[in-house]
Amino acid sequence: MKFSQVKSIKYHETMTTTNTWTKELVQNGAKTAVLVELYTLPFYLTALSSITDTNHNAYKSLLSICIEEIASSYSINSISFGNTTV
C-alpha cells in the first residue's frame, strides 16, 4: 500500500452531516494509521539495532515499542480492510 492509494481526508470531511462516522471514513483513517505505524517502525528498529547490551533498559523499551507497533499495525490493518473480528 502506498500513500497515494489512501484517500486523503480533509478536516471538514471527517464526519458526515449527521456527525456520524461512516465505514469508509473509519477504513480510510485506519489505512492512514497503518502507514504511520509502518513509517515509524524502521526508526525504532534502527535505534534498537544500535544498542549492543540486550539487558539495557533502553533496549528492552525499544523492543517493547517495536512489538506494540507491529501488533497495532496488524489490528488496524484488519479494520482498514473491513474485518470486524480483530
Image (spheres, rainbow, N blue to C red):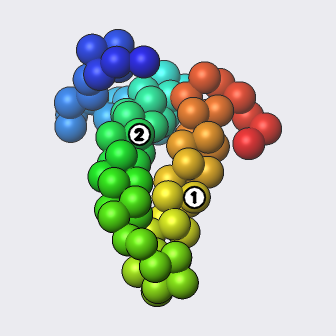
Q: How many marks?
A: 2
Residue 73 higher or lower than 56, as above or below = above
Residue 49, position as x, y percentages in the image? 40, 60
Whether residue 2 is visible: yes
Residue 26 higher or lower than 60, as above or below = above
Chain-order first, disc 2 or disc 1:
2
Is disc 2 placed on a helix, strand or loop?
helix
Which residue is drawn at the image coordinates 44% and 30% (left, top)? 31
Quarter of the figure that contains the N terminus: top left
- What amino acid does circle 2 point to? Leu
- Crowding at mark 1 (Cα within 10 Å: few <14, some 14-19, many 20+): few
Residue 61, position as x, y percentages in the image? 47, 76
Of 7 and 54, nearer the camera is 54
Separation of residues labelled 2 and 1 (CA atoms)? 12 Å
The reply, left or right, for residue 12 in relation to residue 49 is: left
Residue 65, position as x, y percentages in the image? 48, 65
> Which quarter of the picture shows residue 15?
top left
- What amino acid does circle 1 point to? Ile
> Which quarter of the picture shows residue 37?
top left
Residue 29, position as x, y percentages in the image? 41, 35
Q: Are marks 2 and 1 in contact (CB under 8 Å)?
A: no
Look at mark 1 in the image and give the residue it sits on.
Answer: 67
The reply, left or right, for residue 55 in relation to residue 5 is: right
Of 38 and 80, nearer the camera is 38
Of 31 and 2, nearer the camera is 2
> Residue 38 got which mark?
2
Of 20 and 35, nearer the camera is 35
Which residue is drawn at the image coordinates 50% and 58% (left, top)? 66
- Crowding at mark 2 (Cα within 10 Å: few <14, some 14-19, many 20+): some
Which residue is drawn at the image coordinates 46% and 86% (left, top)? 57
